[in-house]
Image (tube, coloured by chain):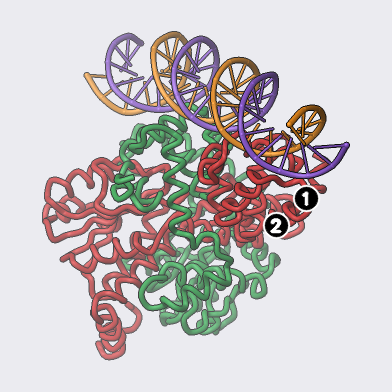
Chain colours: A green, B red, C orange, D purple
Amino acid sequence: MERQSEIPQLLGDLISRNSTKLTEADTRLLDVMMRDPIRAAMENGKAVSFRAGVHPASAVRLARRLGFKGYPEFRTFLQANLIEGGGDFESPAVRMAARLVRAEDGGVLSSVLDSEIAALQQVRNAVSDADVRGFSEVLRDCRRVFVFGRGHSVALASLIALRLNRSGYPAVDLASQMHLIAEALVTLGSGDVVWLLAFRKSSPLIHQIRKIAAERGAKVLALTDLLSARIDPAPDRQISVSRGEAGESQSLVVPMTIANAVILDLAAIDGGRSLHALSGFKTFRADCGLSPVIL
Amino acid sequence: MERQSEIPQLLGDLISRNSTKLTEADTRLLDVMMRDPIRAAMENGKAVSFRAGVHPASAVRLARRLGFKGYPEFRTFLQANLIEGGGDFESPAVRMAARLVRAEDGGVLSSVLDSEIAALQQVRNAVSDADVRGFSEVLRDCRRVFVFGRGHSVALASLIALRLNRSGYPAVDLASQMHLIAEALVTLGSGDVVWLLAFRKSSPLIHQIRKIAAERGAKVLALTDLLSARIDPAPDRQISVSRGEAGESQSLVVPMTIANAVILDLAAIDGGRSLHALSGFKTFRADCGLSPVIL
DNA sequence: TCTCCTCTGCAAAAAAAATTGCAATTCGTT
DNA sequence: AACGAATTGCAATTTTTTTTGCAGAGGAGA
């Protein structure tokens, strides 16, 4: 096989190289293949396409589109890919050991993945469903939500505000309104909720906002790490996750996941309000007549 | 199949149980199979028997002799054997299914955690270190970075831009500059990089921006899911991750983690530039004399 | 040595898998 | 709103894989 060398080394590579040509059925097939490459390499086209929910013919066409002569050749490529890589058959322990050996050079991705996964596992111990429910109940019963974070947390704040809005809860990302922050806060009242985010470095602004909220009777939710946990007076509800050990995740993965859980739980307890708003948003996006460019 | 339980768990077992009945051709076949069980599990009877130097019919007879209905059933056994041994492989799908069964018992939180963890595990199959390195190399060698995402991805875009800036790489989050987007893009040149983010819904703007980048000779990186993988012309580098099954993660956890890995890898290959910039940022924040409020 | 038995390879038949032409559908576009 | 390009599923066809009947080869025992 002299074309061996021409064959892209990895399925992912193959996909990006041909990404422009791929169709809906193609992506479904590739999806199940990437999920379990070993199984895909063993099964025949009929089985794979069945699992992908498409017709066997689509498997053949995918293979063609990717530059193979037919499905069998595509499967052979998948197999070679596996056998060559070899590593895929190693147990997790072996893989870990192997990674440590070549620690500096390769393995950044694996390290990051391990670290994030470990951080998520820890959340099980640190956060309870009652904590999540506490947040979602406050949100359900409020009039407006103001989300605030600084530094890395601005990204999280904007995401939370976006998702709350789509779920039918009027939410403002204060970070994106810094120049109007006073104007926003002056309207704060007892039906409102302020959701604070603080990790690593907590901005003094956090404490000022918390104070204003206290004066005006707004409820306060805080999602923080342990370093930033001291907010005075104490928030009505607070979830604090252990900041990662040295080397562990310092990313937003953990708080983002907790926020996701809160918003999901909200949908479970608000009697359809979230779901209704979400489907409303969907049809709005389709029908609004605005150029899809702005959405 | 009630005979399932009678099937010996391992190929070796199988052989010893039936060793008395085995013929010359059988042993030849089993020999090549034991030598490379993975390959044997993938190949068809014709290929295996060819490697063993016997007729395909002998492969069928061996399968029969071992108690299978035919060669395909034998091969299925070999595959199951293999996957079982791997341990790692039953994971994502099986675990997910198991979770759905006991869905109520654990709350929303643990369900979300499981889902995110499974999604991260999937990344091991879908993305290689070489993919990550490809991104980081492009970033290292560029002049400026423009990050663009719409919808949920705006949060990710702003985070990426923030982190790149702190690492000493001039980066602009186009989403936060929508009103100046033309002004930003008009300066695009061949030293620049555009980093596109597209998940679930890919905005038409993505394609326009990609086109402009192509005209002006800017490099393009794309981080997408499979549904949004079609970008024309194909980006210089692209990482596509599997879109989650229904119920699986639709969050930004996976792409965010990949972005983190890229930025981390960048620090590993840029000869200290990132690290220097990061420590510079730290001292700046301490000494700048600006109110810490704005940081 | 002859007979009987089993095993092997061959080749034809059967079964399964892969491929392709075609019609219906779904897009986006004019 | 209608057209046109593109994609999908179905069904018929082709190709590959598996199975089976058969005959010859090799060996053990009478």
Where residue A80 appears, x then y in whole percent?
44, 50
The residue positioned 41% from the left and 62% from the top of the image is: B258
For this view, does A247 lie left or right of residue A239?
A: left
Residue under numbered circle 1: B20
Residue under numbered circle 2: B12
Q: How many numbered discs, if any?
A: 2
Q: Amino acid at mark 1?
A: Thr
Q: Amino acid at mark 2?
A: Gly
Where residue A74 appears, x then y in whole percent?
42, 39
Where residue B289 appears, x then y in whole percent?
25, 88
Q: Are marks 1 and 2 in contact (CB under 8 Å)?
A: no
The residue positioned 56% from the left and 53% from the top of the image is: B38
Q: Earlier in the sequence, mark 1 or mark 2?
A: 2
Q: Which is more toward the observer, B164 or A25?
A: A25
For this view, does A41 lie left or right of residue A236?
A: left
Check the picture and name the quadrant holding the N terminus of chain B.
Answer: top right
Q: Chain of mark 1?
A: B
